[in-house]
Amino acid sequence: MVTTKVELKRVKVARYLSEETTAFAAQLWVDGEYIADVSNDGHGGNNRIMYRKGQAKGQAFEVWCKAQPPRVSEYGSLDMDADYYITLMLEDYEEEQQVKRWCKTKTVIRLEGDKLGDFHTYKRAYDPEFAQRLRDTEPTLLEIVNERYL
């Protein structure tokens, strides 16, 4: 299976139910095809993956996930599998939603040397004049994140 695009759609996060893990429900799409419903009740344990169109697509997705490189974290190297891949996609989704919320009322930037997921905010709504001032005065400016959503 040569996969070009894996995404979660129709994501619903239930923070009020989340205890040990994030409670959520979502659709798993691979290369434009809806292949599974995924969820977690938020009480710890693995994500549930309910494949829609037989096991062939699901098995291909799981094999593809296992072929992905291990993820290095503060806990060491973690081998990839479908459950872990979905967890990482959910974390990316939640970060994206948080950044979008910030961008509504603040100017959000990234600087050279920032770790992935680090952002700096100004308590000022984005506008082109302020963006130009940041470009002129901040020599290590990597990105004005608000511009992703224009």
Image (spheres, rainbow, N blue to C red):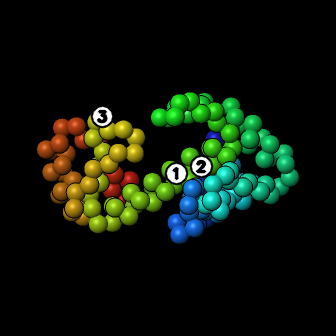
What's the distance in space between the residues labelled 3 and 1, CA to CA? 22 Å
Horizontal and vertical percent position of residue 109:
28, 49
Horizontal and vertical percent position of residue 85:
62, 44
Residue 76 appears in the picture as rendered = yes
Q: Is residue 84 left or right of residue 131?
A: right
What's the distance in space between the residues labelled 1 and 2, CA to CA? 6 Å
How many residues crowd mark 2 within 10 Å: few (<14), some (14–19), many (20+)? some
Question: Of helix, strand and loop, which one carries label 3?
Answer: loop
Question: Of helix, strand and loop, which one carries label 1?
Answer: helix
Q: Is residue 123 left or right of residue 145?
A: left
Residue shown at 74% from the left, 41% from the top: 62
Residue shown at 59% from the left, 33% from the top: 78
What's the distance in space between the residues labelled 2 and 3, CA to CA? 26 Å
**Contact (Cβ within 8 Å) of mark 1 with mark 2:** yes
- Indicate which disc residue 87 carries: 2
Q: Amino acid at mark 2?
A: Thr
Residue shown at 26% from the left, 54% from the top: 121
- Indicate which disc residue 12 carries: none
Figure quadrant of residue 71 = top right
How many residues crowd mark 3 within 10 Å: few (<14), some (14–19), many (20+)? few
Q: Earlier in the sequence, mark 3 or mark 1?
A: 1
| Front position in the image: 37 or 143 | 37
Horizontal and vertical percent position of residue 28:
67, 55
Query: For mark 3, what is the residue?
Result: 113
Q: Amino acid at mark 3?
A: Gly
